[in-house]
Amino acid sequence: MNTESKAVVLLSGGLDSTTTLAIAKSQGYELYCISFNYGQRHAFELNAAKRVATAFGIRSHLIINIDLSCIGHSALTSDIDIPKNRTSQEIESEIPVTYVPARNTIFLSYALAWAEVLDASHIFIGVNAVDYSGYPDCRPEYIEAFERMANLATKSCVEQKLHIKIQTPLIHLTKAQIIRKGIELDVDYNLTHSCYDPLPSGVACGICDSCFLRKKGFFEAGLVDPIQYAK
Amino acid sequence: MNTESKAVVLLSGGLDSTTTLAIAKSQGYELYCISFNYGQRHAFELNAAKRVATAFGIRSHLIINIDLSCIGHSALTSDIDIPKNRTSQEIESEIPVTYVPARNTIFLSYALAWAEVLDASHIFIGVNAVDYSGYPDCRPEYIEAFERMANLATKSCVEQKLHIKIQTPLIHLTKAQIIRKGIELDVDYNLTHSCYDPLPSGVACGICDSCFLRKKGFFEAGLVDPIQYAK
């Protein structure tokens, strides 16, 4: 097995990262998934990541406990209210309170460390710069800058045994295109979880930004979302 | 207080990071220190960080628990033997087993997240490209690439409220110059801990690469190291 054929995939258990995993699998990589227990408000996301990893029969699934709540400042990790019932225009107008400071940078840094240990050249992340929530660390220029830094950061890269490539197969796709791609690759979206603020039962609220974008994606793709919504 | 006057300082409790903190203090910044409990073999380092932070009367000291040992692959976080009794030439000949994959990238990512929450423009890190152990993530080209990435990664940077500057005041200094600078700034090096493999009492072994470089630094500076060594 050469370094070219191993990939570390960031897996949140949501629609985007699950589709990214399916794409990496279809390209023939040996798959290693990494997820983060980062003081999210709920564990449904992490349980979805475990279900998805099992369904894909991946080689290894690393779940890293990290405490972003001690840094604070996001509705996903502290007591700020999750915005509800917003329109596309409202969602796109500003970076929302669900933004977690430097989250993708922290996640990609751990993925980089694991990639070096595994001798894996590829890191897949399901960021998206089209139907997204305006997060700065989802943009192509950010990903390129991270990749450049990564190739100066590690022993394997400096000794030229490894060239790290950050793969972002969803970056220029709409949510509808992502969903169509996933269906083409037989993704079971019933395994995934996207909602920022689910009911105690785990059912998606249907009205947070993440639910809104997911529902809109399925609608525009002309497909039925298999998960349940409260609203 | 504007964003220009706040600084996040990475503090390990060792000689370099403590001198870096003293330099940041002498430049008049409001100081916020961040340390990491990353599955090191011993807690002496973290206790030194706490002593130093207290001695400097800093504004806030954040200690983040992160588990790098689950990623493995370093003598500092797993069961690989720490190299002993090596010469300068041996230390400089290769990147040693004490290298922790992507460590500075992970540490700087957390510092970036906290800097954004604090509205702090400056992140100080005591990396050194002269009397160092050959770690790739201590080189100027790495630091520049991280800074460039950081300014594309965060909401505050994208909204142009903040420009992050990674400050590396030690990067071109020899260990002897670092120590002279610290003494000039009244650093009490007795508070610091550098050894990779201390005795159960906390006394430095005197023969690991870190002890070797520290002793050599004090010798070349013509000064006496106030800490005790086993050998």
Image: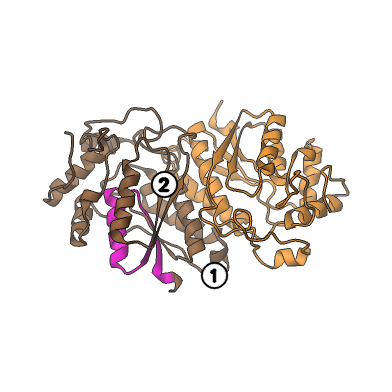
Chain colours: A orange, B brown
- Give the crowd class for mark 2: few <14, some 14-19, many >=20 residues within 10 Å: many
Label 1 close to label 2 by CB (< 8 Å): no
Which residue type carries mark 2? Phe
Q: Which residue is mark 1?
A: B160
Is A167 included in the stretch rendered in magenta?
Answer: no
Q: Position of residue B231 (x, y in %)?
A: 16, 33
**Residue A208 percent across, percent down from the top left:** 75, 57
| Residue at (31, 58) in percent of width and height | B21
- The 10 Å Cα crowd at callout 1, few under 14, some 14 to 19, many 20 or more, is few
Which quarter of the picture shows residue B34? bottom left
Q: Position of residue B224 (x, y in %)?
A: 12, 48
Q: Which residue, given by chain and number where applicable, does mark 2 sit on?
A: B36
Distance between the Cα atoms at labels 1 and 2? 29 Å
Secondary structure beneath dot 1 equals: loop
| Quarter of the picture holding the N terminus of chain A | top right
Q: Which residues are magenta?
A: B4-31
In the image, residue B25 lies in the stretch drawn in magenta: yes
